[in-house]
Structure formats: structure tokens, C-alpha cells
Amino acid sequence: MNATTPVEKIRLVVAQQLSQLGATGTDSVGESILIRNGLFCGRKFQCSGYHVVLFIEEDEIKFFSPCGDLLKSTSAIACIHEYEAHLDSHPDSGQFEPERRRAA
């Protein structure tokens, strides 16, 4: 499935990464909008006890285990660019590996 908007691409990145981390049922990931001081600041995704938080202003996606441990932190923009580059070079493939950054 080709995503057309940035948020659709992020959803695909999140589902793919959750699957790699061991989450099941990644075809139905729950999603919430995050509001801080009355302003949109990101999104939260949930699946199989895992939590993923997308921080828009910080350009960061953080993946948390069911126990709350930070598993991975990555750039949202870099994930979108990697997703697009992968589709350009492998148009029939839906699998890709987003960039990894060390969790702070």
C-alpha cells in the first residue's frame, strides 16, 4: 500500500516497526491525538501493550515496550524520506527498515 500523506507514511512506519519489535495485530494499531496547552503536539499509537509517541515539534518517534522501557528513538522526517526512497527503488515491496537513533 502506498501512503500519500506524511501521517499515512508514519502510520506504516509505526506498524512495521511494532511488528519487528514483537507486537501482534499491527493491522489495527490504536491512535490518539496529543494536545498540549490547547495545541496539537503529536500522536500516540498503541498495539499489544507497546506505545509509540510521535512528537511533531521535536521530529521524533519514540517506541516504548509494554513495561514502559524506551526501545527506540528515531527521526520522523528521516523515516518518511526512507519510506519514499524505498518505494522509489522497490515499488512492489512494502517492507523497509527506518533509520535508528540511540534513545536518549
Image (tube, rainbow, N blue to C red):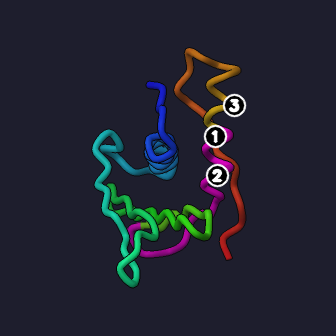
Cα separation between marks 2 and 3: 12 Å
- Between disc 3 and disc 1, the foreground one is 3
* Quadrant location of the C terminus in the rendered image: bottom right
The quadrant holding residue 36 is bottom left
- Sort mark 1 into few (<14), some (14-19) or many (20+) by Cα contacts within 10 Å: few
Q: What stretch is highlighted in magenta?
A: 66-82
Dot 2 or dot 3, earlier in sequence: 2
Per the rendering, the mark at residue 46 is none
Q: Label 1: which residue? A: 97
Residue 77 percent coordinates (x, y):
64, 51
Residue type for callout 3? Ala
Residue at 29% x, 54% y is 30
Q: Label 2: which residue? A: 77
82 lies above or below 48 = above
Residue at 48% x, 39% y is 5
Residue at 60% x, 17% y is 91
Q: Label 3: which residue? A: 85
In this rendering, position of residue 45 left or right of residue 81: left
Residue 97 percent coordinates (x, y):
64, 40
Most extreme residue toward the bottom, as rendered? 37
Residue 54 percent coordinates (x, y):
49, 63
